[in-house]
């Protein structure tokens, strides 16, 4: 369920209300209207991943900042009276004190695979996360908060649900995750977010318009003549698009296809290179960070840095990067966006994606 309860919206609902990333405002409308779902939504292991690792993320945040937290119970603060009744929510943690901030804050704990985590490192928080925290800041009256994000090995995604069903203790998994960060195998980052009146005003306006709808909003546009991936497992797909069970994406562990034996060598070579690349990227990242620190310590500055004769000279530059917020542009200029966007479908191969 997207909604906390009938007619109430929590912080994660903005992804859907604003059609951001994999969100869908039409689905949100069906839930708010009490529409009976056509199908049961499949359980996703990523939810168990978040359940297991939330305590570890909270601990890592305290370790890295010196903050004190309250929660996960009793995280509801006095509600600002000026907000509409449908604006509700339960933050992951309340930041009771922080050595470098004044007053109470809000903490949200998230996990991310390697690629989403790296994207956050380079581009900052995704817009749905920003709006989620602004929702809680408006709800509680707090002036600041943080998103604490833990990078998790994607290869474990098939096992979180199995561990929970087997009764693996949560505290043991959390302790192991903290050790993964301490040893450098996983990464952890906390992103500070401050209350933004303009964003809150924007959410309030969009929320009021949505809550006043009498008919379902438009569907997400088709992609190459077919329903987008978001719709294929949606519990309302028959009501919305007439989509039935036949087009539902099969589970990875059912009806496994076996490649011909003559492809064994190609499989093994591709996987070997994949592992080499993954390990080399991690090793290079660590070596580069160490080199950057050493260059600063040696009082060197941007320019051409000559090292040993066995390697090329190093060009050290300071780069200014600007990014274009395509999600916000699409939301505010939908017609113009539709005239220029080019969509395509490509194949995606992921090692460890199934069970044989």
Image (cartoon, rainbow, N blue to C red):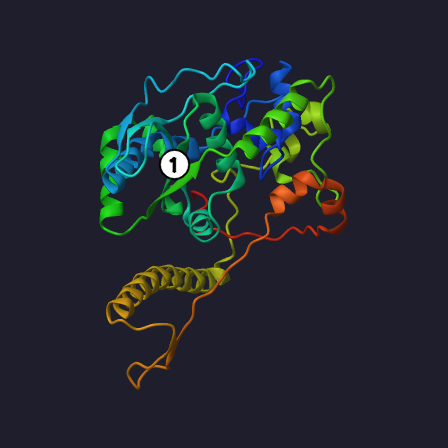
Name, please, the residue furthest toward the bottom.
Answer: 309
Above-or-below relation of 235 to 174: above
- Look at the image and tell me in which quarter the C terminus lies: top left
Q: Nearer the viewer, residue 170 or 338?
A: 338
Q: Seen in the image, is 192 located left or right of residue 247?
A: left
Q: Nearer the viewer, residue 34 or 193?
A: 193
Q: Nearer the viewer, residue 145 or 350?
A: 145
Task: Mark 1: give few (<14), some (14-19) or many (20+) Cα within 10 Å.
Answer: some
Q: Residue at x 64, y 15 (%)?
A: 33
Residue on which disc 1 sits: 146
Q: Residue at x 72, y 46 (%)?
A: 337
On the question of residue 224 being in view, the answer is no
Q: Seen in the image, is 325 located left or right of residue 69?
A: right
Q: Nearer the viewer, residue 28 or 275?
A: 28
Secondary structure of the residue carrying tag 1 is strand
Residue 156 in the image: state x and y as whole percent: 36, 42
On the question of residue 172 being in view, the answer is yes
Residue 116 in the image: state x and y as whole percent: 46, 47
**Count of marks overlaid on the render:** 1
Residue 94 in the image: state x and y as whole percent: 34, 26
Residue 97 in the image: state x and y as whole percent: 27, 30
Q: Residue at x 51, y 54 (%)?
A: 259
Q: Residue at x 62, y 53 (%)?
A: 346
Above-or-below relation of 303 to 85: below
Name, please, the residue furthest toward the front.
Answer: 102
């Amino acid at each position: 369920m997207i909604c906390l309860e009938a007619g109430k919206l929590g912080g994660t609902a903005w992804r859907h209300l604003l059609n951001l990333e994999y969100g869908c405002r039409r689905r949100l409308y069906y839930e708010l209207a009490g529409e009976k779902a056509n199908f049961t939504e499949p359980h996703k292991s990523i939810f168990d991943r978040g359940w297991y690792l939330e305590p570890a993320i909270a601990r890592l945040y305290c370790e890295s900042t010196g903050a004190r937290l309250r929660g996960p119970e009793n995280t509801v603060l006095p509600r600002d009276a000026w907000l509409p009744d449908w604006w509700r929510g339960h933050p992951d943690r309340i930041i009771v004190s922080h050595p470098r901030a004044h007053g109470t804050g809000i903490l949200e704990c998230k996990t991310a695979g390697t690629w989403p985590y790296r994207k956050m490192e380079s581009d900052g928080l995704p817009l749905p996360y920003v709006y989620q925290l602004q929702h809680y800041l408006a709800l509680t009256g707090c002036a600041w908060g943080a998103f604490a994000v833990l990078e998790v090995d994607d290869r474990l995604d098939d096992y979180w649900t199995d561990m929970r069903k087997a009764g693996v203790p949560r505290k043991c998994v959390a302790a192991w995750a903290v050790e993964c960060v301490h040893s450098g195998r996983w990464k952890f980052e906390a992103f500070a977010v401050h209350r933004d009146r303009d964003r809150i005003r924007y959410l309030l306006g969009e929320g009021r318009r949505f809550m006043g709808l009498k008919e379902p909003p438009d569907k997400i546009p088709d992609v190459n003549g077919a329903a987008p991936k978001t719709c294929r497992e949606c519990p309302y797909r028959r009501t919305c698009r007439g989509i039935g069970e036949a087009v539902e994406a099969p589970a990875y562990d059912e009806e496994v296809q076996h490649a011909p034996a003559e492809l064994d060598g190609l499989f093994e070579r591709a996987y070997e290179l994949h592992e080499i690349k993954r390990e080399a990227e991690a090793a290079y990242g660590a070596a580069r960070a160490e080199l950057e620190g050493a260059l600063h310590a040696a009082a060197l500055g941007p320019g051409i840095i000559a090292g040993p004769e066995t390697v090329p000279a190093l060009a050290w530059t300071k780069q200014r990067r600007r990014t274009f917020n395509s999600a916000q542009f699409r939301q505010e200029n939908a017609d113009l966006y539709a005239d220029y966007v080019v969509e395509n479908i490509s194949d995606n191969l992921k090692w460890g994606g199934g069970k044989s």
